[in-house]
Image (cartoon, helix red, strand yellow):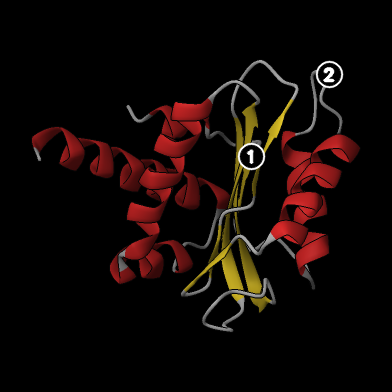
Amino acid sequence: MHPLAERLNSTNVVCRLPAASRKRALQAIASLVGDGGLGEDVVFDGLLARERLGSTGLGDGVAIPHGRFDCSIVRVAFVTLPEPVDFEAPDAQGVDLVFALVVPRDENQAHLDDLASLSTVFADAGNRTRLRQCETDEQLLDTIRSLLNDTMDQTRTA
């Protein structure tokens, strides 16, 4: 199983999370991953600071907010939004697929590998469509896990 797929569960995957702005989306994501010594405020402030350096919007309605934190494990959250919000993506499209990564400061290679896997998943228009068609948290969780595992399998056979 892909390491990111292993970290996804029913508490950090939300289908159609109501958020009217990038800030509100990041606040909601911070509440999904901020616990166990790494508070919501710390995560929110860190993700927001990263956005100020440059948007994590990739285009095609996708954003991967991420940052390095004083934590011991990678934490993730994946949400879809019912209405796209402005993430200042290079294609000027609103974002409705948001995968967040909270990474320990010393996890350099894992961080890059995770970003590469996510970029591969989200680069495929069919994958984005499948994710947008999900109607429940469970369906979204199963779909993103499947897509991540397929990406890992493709990498192994390449």
Q: Quadrant of residue 97?
A: bottom right
Disc 1 + disc 2, Cβ < 8 Å: no
Asked if residue 85 lies left or right of residue 99, the reply is: right
Instruction: From the image, tell me which residue sits under label 2.
Output: 37
Location of the C terminus by quadrant is top left
Q: Which label sits on residue 112?
A: none
Q: Nearer the viewer, residue 46 or 38?
A: 46
Q: Residue at x 75, y 22 (%)?
A: 70
Residue type at the position of mark 2: Gly
Residue 135: percent from the left, percent from the top? 52, 62
Location of the N terminus by quadrant is top left
Hey, which residue is sitting farthest bottom in the picture?
92
Q: Secondary structure at mark 2?
A: loop
Distance CA(mark 1)–CA(mark 2): 17 Å
Q: Residue at x 54, y 23 (%)?
A: 107
Q: Residue at x 66, y 15 (%)?
A: 72
Instruction: From the image, tell me which residue sits under label 1.
Output: 12
Residue 58: percent from the left, percent from the top? 51, 66
Q: Dot 2, crowdedness within 10 Å: few (<14), some or many (≥20)?
A: few
Up-down relation of residue 100 to residue 81 (above or below): above
In primary-sequence order, the first of circles 1 and 2 is 1
Up-down relation of residue 119 to residue 155 (above or below): below
Q: Residue at x 40, y 54 (%)?
A: 119
Up-down relation of residue 92 to residue 145 (above or below): below
